[in-house]
Amino acid sequence: MADSHENIRKQAEILRELGITPISEELITQIEKSFYNMPDEVKDSLNVTAMLLSCIGSGNFDMKEKAWVPTSDMVYSFDVESFDFTGMYTHFLQGIIAISNNEFEITQIKEDTSGVDFNSGSGIQIIQFCYNGTPYSYKARAMYDWFDEGMLEFMNQVLENEKNPKRLYFMSDGYQECIVFYCTQFWAKRFEKATGCSLQDKLRKM
């Protein structure tokens, strides 16, 4: 177990060196305790770096106010099975705004679920927003409460259209968490070399 704890702290230090914050002692201790209580077969399959990133970038959600508050300006993570079907793309775009370094604006976010059959969990959910004042629209496939990951690729198309040199690079924690960075290809390669984790900017099996 000492080796596992040492690995968690080693990976935390690597992330700090990459500029990914905040990583508090409280967070590390919390992850160590969670890791300690897991069955050995689960521990063997876990990606410690992904665990850290998921915790750092998940933000906090006020269920009463239905307001999401970011916890990092470097990484955003979210569960692809959403607890708020009618607002999950709004929350996603808020996460992208949080890691945008104020390099662009996303405004006038709207979600139209009139084309969704809630009984069958199918249909089309339309997401509208403006990027620096330019309107965009994405037709997401409704799959009950599951996020349409095509939205990630669509956002990269928006960034390309707007001649933004950065892209969304993403990875999975191996389960249901999607971890997203807004960065250059150079930084993505640096991250991969430092952590051993692969990032992608196009959809494939994560």
Image: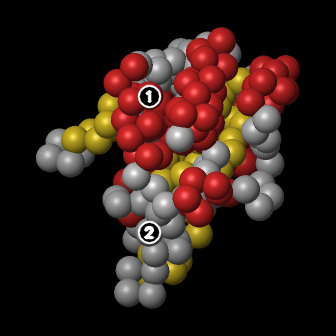
Q: Which quadrant of the view contains residue 48?
A: top right
Q: In front: 3, or 106?
A: 3
Q: State the SS at label 2.
A: loop
Q: In front: 118, or 169?
A: 169
Q: In front: 65, or 36?
A: 36
Query: Residue drawn at (58%, 38%), measured in percent from left and top?
Result: 4
Disc 2 designates what residue?
145
In the displayed structure image, the side of residue 200 where residue 97 appears, left or right: left
Counting from the top left corner in percent of width and height, residue 192 is at 80, 31
Name the N-terminal-most of marks 2 and 1: 1
Q: Is residue 134 visible?
A: no
Counting from the top left corner in percent of width and height, residue 147 is at 53, 61
- Spatial CA span between label 2 and label 1: 31 Å
The colouring scheme, among rainbow, by chain, secondary structure or one colour, is: secondary structure
How many C-alpha atoms fall within 10 Å of the one at disc 2: few (<14), some, or many (≥20)?
Answer: some
Outermost residue toward the bottom in this view:
120
Counting from the top left corner in percent of width and height, residue 139 is at 60, 61
**Tag nearer the camera, 2 or 1:** 1
In the displayed structure image, the side of residue 163 where residue 174 appears, left or right: left
How many C-alpha atoms fall within 10 Å of the one at disc 1: few (<14), some, or many (≥20)?
Answer: some
Q: Quadrant of the C terminus?
A: bottom right
Q: Amino acid at mark 1?
A: Ile
Q: In front: 94, or 53?
A: 53
On residue 28, which mark appears? 1
Query: Residue drawn at (69%, 35%), measured in percent from left and top?
Result: 168
Outermost residue toward the left in this view:
64
Q: Amino acid at mark 2?
A: Asp
Are the residues tagged 2 and 1 within 8 Å (C-beta)? no
Q: Considering only vertical position in the picture, is 98 above or below 32?
A: above
Query: Residue drawn at (29%, 41%), measured in percent from left and top?
Result: 61
Q: Considering only vertical position in the picture, is 117 above or below 18?
A: below
Q: Considering only vertical position in the picture, is 142 above or below 75?
A: below
